[in-house]
Image (spheres, grey):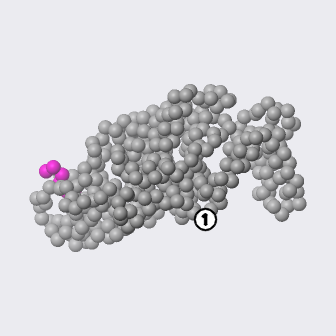
Amino acid sequence: MLQRLGWQRTGGFRNALDYWEARTHSHEMSALRDTRLVFPLIPDAPDYEDLLTDLEQRLRILHGDDLARAIDLVRVMISRRLDEVDVKRETDNEAGLIAWQSGNQMIDSARGLLSTAAKTASGPRKRFAHASSTIADEYLRHCYMGQTRVGSYVVTALTPSEESFATSKSASAKSKKHPRIPGRQITATLVGALGAVSAAIEESRGAKDALQAFDEKIGSGVSYELLAALEPITTGDESAIVVEFNENDQLALAEMPVHRAEFAFTPEDGKVIARARQHFEQAPEPRLLTVSGEVTLLRSSQADAERQIRLHTRIDGRPRSILVNLSDEQYDQAVRAHGAKVMLSVTGEVEQRTRGSAIDRAEAVRVETTPVSAEVKSEARAPLFDMGE
């Protein structure tokens, strides 16, 4: 709540007190002798109640009705199990004013980030177009827009953590093929995707092929839609996206290492994001194919649950090497095919990357009986069965 009112933690004392300073000084604050806030942390301490009362009085003097509104919002967030996503952009004035068109762009970008996170949670792609629109639409209907914070211009989105969302409108939407995805998982997906963008920016610095780093992060959530949502935010000014998970519930994911994540972007980062967005936009549309070939690489990492293979095959009569991401069960089939020296068939959307091709999510995998020593006469083909939405 203090952060919402424009305060930042500057230190503490023996895990008993936290010290907070205002990011900017108001007229009311300039009249105070001591502008530091002291937040007590130990309820059993003899001076806890006195310090808490003093803190509340000072906040009411400084913020008036804004304090009551902030308290009400936090209560709603706790009761409705809402996580928080803040999209920030620096402005050249203390009032946090921003041009109308730029403000609209930030709202559109925030919507794009949430929509893309929902789509990515159901399976990463280089470009979604109209795919996975069901979960994105349903997720956005359950999100809220919160009040802006003190300081630079901020768009606040409040996202549901407890509800789950359908990935398909079909009658089998509750089946294993079309699982429902919790809102908290979607928010965590956004954190992972933003982290992947930040990592790709760092890896691209000084690299001969700067955009390859973004291609390699598609499996971690980088997509055309994510980059298109980030570009307006990061162009021309310092910007940041902060995600705060509601710590007052029991829905924390096992793989969620932190309760708060912040991703800062410089104008130079914005230029890299713009180039990557253009690169993704120019990429050919993925093709849903079934490819058969020899497993030439097996890669398994327990640390990040990565299961990858490289499949040597033919597409349009030409030899191709395709990197394929697999589930645990599919990976076991690939290991069996490799051990038996027989062909493996994989159905999925084949995407062209900077270097080679890839299938980010295999829809189906089958171990064939054809030995790998035999020349593959068949071409990659359209799947013989309906893959659904």
Answer whether residue 119 is magenta in the image. no
Inspect this view and state whether residue 322 appears: yes
195 left or right, relative to 214 = right
Between 388 and 206, the residue placed more toward the observer is 388
User: What is the three-letter code of the residue carrying label 1?
Assistant: Gln
Instruction: Please give the name of the residue rendered at 70% of the width and 46% of the height, measured from the top-left corner.
Output: 70
Q: Picture quarter containing residue 386?
A: bottom left
State which quarter of the image contains the C terminus.
bottom left
Q: Reply above or below: 259 against 22.
A: below
Residue 122 placed where, x, y %?
Answer: 41, 56
Please, what secondary structure does the residue beneath circle 1 have? Answer: loop
Q: Main secondary structure of the magenta part?
A: strand
Residue 385 placed where, x, y %?
Answer: 22, 61
Q: Reply above or below: 105 against 246.
A: above
Residue 190 placed where, x, y %?
Answer: 49, 50
Instruction: Please give the name of the residue rendered at 68% of the width and 51% of the height, measured from the top-left corner.
Output: 74
**Which residue matches tag 1?**
250
Label count reads 1
Between 271 and 174, the residue placed more toward the observer is 174
Instruction: Please give the name of the residue rendered at 46% of the width and 36% of the height, measured from the top-left corner.
Output: 231
Inspect this view and state whether residue 207 appears: no
260 left or right, relative to 129 = right
Q: Picture quarter containing residue 214?
A: top left
Between 37 and 159, the residue placed more toward the observer is 159
Residue 315 placed where, x, y %?
Answer: 18, 52
Q: Which residues are magenta?
A: 312-317
Q: Residue furthest front?
A: 171
Q: Residues within 10 Å of mark 1 (few under 14, many from 20)?
A: few
Instruction: Please give the name of the residue rendered at 23% of the width and 69% of the height, measured from the top-left corner.
Output: 367
